[in-house]
Amino acid sequence: MYIQQLHLGITRNCTLECEHCLRGNRQHINMNPIILDKIFDSVKEIKNLLLTGGEPLIAIEVLEHLVEIIKTKDIKINKIYIVTNGTVLSPRIINVLKELNSFSKLDLKVSNDIFHQTELINKNLLDIRNENYQKLNLRFANVREYGKETYCYTKIALVKRGNAKNLTDERLQEFNKKANQTYVIDNSLYENNYPITLENDAVIGKITIDVFGSLVEPDLSYEEEDMIGYETGINVMTMPFKEAIESFIRYHEDKSKQKTLKI
């Protein structure tokens, strides 16, 4: 099976608890590597693979298992994206990153927005992050951290989900005084439809799988992911991956129809 975009939430654990994080409070949960086995029993090629958390580099066992799967099954991946806060580094992680880069184009970015900088300083991790940055020769960027920020011209839009539900206008103004760009709340950016189609073993669109193996919509808080997982029961641990995709497409189409009817 070919998948255009596959997003795996491989951990809910993190070293930080940023105020703008739409995911919510960190949870000490990593993805069961068996979930990867279930997925890659069917998948042979991926255009874009996105690995997120939490802090994805915490889940080293999951990443090492992914490397083994790619090797043994000869999975073709055009590009792998990982966004990290840069505070986690070890010889094992460096080895995994080198392996992933040997299979595909690895796009590894260090989160460097004002929210991360503040949290790093509060937790005395700024020097550690900068030291890790030097060791890995990573590039700092005004990144669009997946699920947390979206560029909107010279403004950066945040969504009121997860921790950001508690982000008041006054608190946002405090950050804007320190930041080079202006942060605004704009929930409309996360109300788009995400069409998914499956034709001849080719999935066009984005498939998002949470830490428990449930198929969910992208850009959700952990709480929202859990609600959808419970509501649909669409999980790669309980059904073949292709069947799970077909079920999720039907769920998504029904949801879109209901939304249209309400309008």
Image (cartoon, grey):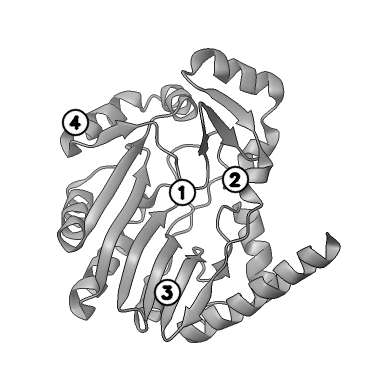
Q: Locate the C terminus and report the quarter of the image it occupies.
A: bottom right
Residue matched to label 4? 134
Residue matched to label 2? 24
Mark before the other along the chain sequence, 4 or 2: 2
The residue that appears at 24% across and 34% down in the rendered structure is 132
Q: Would you say the residues marked 3 and 2 are in contact, meaning their CB atoms lie under 8 Å apart?
A: no
Mark before the other along the chain sequence, 3 or 4: 3
Under mark 3, the amino acid is Ile
Rendered position, 156 above or below 247: above
Residue matched to label 1? 54
Q: Badge 1 local density, few (<14 within 10 Å), some, or many (20+)?
A: many
Residue nearest the viewer, comparing 205 with 221? 205
Q: Badge 3 local density, few (<14 within 10 Å), some, or many (20+)?
A: many
Callout 3: SS: helix
Measure the C-alpha gap from mark 4 to mark 1.
Answer: 22 Å
Mark before the other along the chain sequence, 4 or 1: 1
Callout 1: SS: loop
Residue matched to label 3? 35
Under mark 4, the amino acid is Gln
Whether residue 95 is visible: yes
Image label count: 4
